[in-house]
């Protein structure tokens, strides 16, 4: 299928316009993220993707008290600082290798 230069430019302009619309939409979404006292709140989906864990693991961390959470209108949220502290607390001591045979 052959298209001429004018038709190609027309298509490219339409694609560029749609990309601009998507970009603006993403910017608006980022501005709408929930904040409390200037701190970002993360929901379950954010944490599952960030930590690459299962829903059950996340529930286990909440139940054990290792990860503080807040309920707003029946939805669970986590303060960004609490999540970072949880990650720091979860680090194990570094493993040091000893040379057995030289």
Image (cartoon, rainbow, N blue to C red):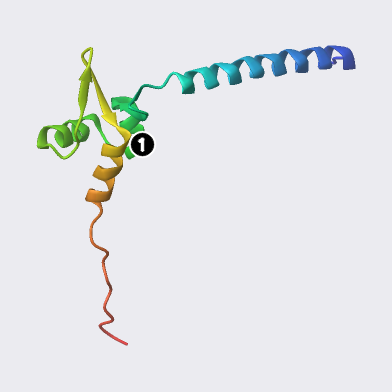
Give the structural element (helix, strand or loop) at label 1.
helix
Question: In the drawing, does residue 42 fall left or right of residue 23?
Answer: left
Percent position (x, y) of residue 81? Answer: 30, 38
Image height of 95 relative to 31, above or below: below
* Residue at (30% x, 25% y) in the render: 43
Q: Residue at point 16% right, 33% down?
A: 62
Q: Which of 15 and 40 is in front in this view?
A: 40
Q: Check the image and name the residue furthest to the left.
A: 64
Position of residue 24 measured from the top left corner of the image (x, y, whole percent):
59, 18
Q: Mark 1 points at which residue?
A: 50
* In this picture, residue 35 sits left or right of residue 24: left
Q: Which residue: 23% across, 12% down?
A: 73
Q: Which residue lies furthest to the front in this view?
A: 37
Within 10 Å of the Cα at label 1, are there few (<14), some (14-19), or many (20+) other Cα atoms? few
Quadrant assignment for the C terminus: bottom left
Of the 4 image quadrants, the one containing the N terminus is top right
30 relative to 57, above or below? above
Q: Is residue 1 visible?
A: no
Count of numbered marks: 1
Along the viewing direction, whichever of 6 and 61 lies nearer the viewer: 61
| 66 to 10, vertically: above or below | below
């Amino acid at each position: 299928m052959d298209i001429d230069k004018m038709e190609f430019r027309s298509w490219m302009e339409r694609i560029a316009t749609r990309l601009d619309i998507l970009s603006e939409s993403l910017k608006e979404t980022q501005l709408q993220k929930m904040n409390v006292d200037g701190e970002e709140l993360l929901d379950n989906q954010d944490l599952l993707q960030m930590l690459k864990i299962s829903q059950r693991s996340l529930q286990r961390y909440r139940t054990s008290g290792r990860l503080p959470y807040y309920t707003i209108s029946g939805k669970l949220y986590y303060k960004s600082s609490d999540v970072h502290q949880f990650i720091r607390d979860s680090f194990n001591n570094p493993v040091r290798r000893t040379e057995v045979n030289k």
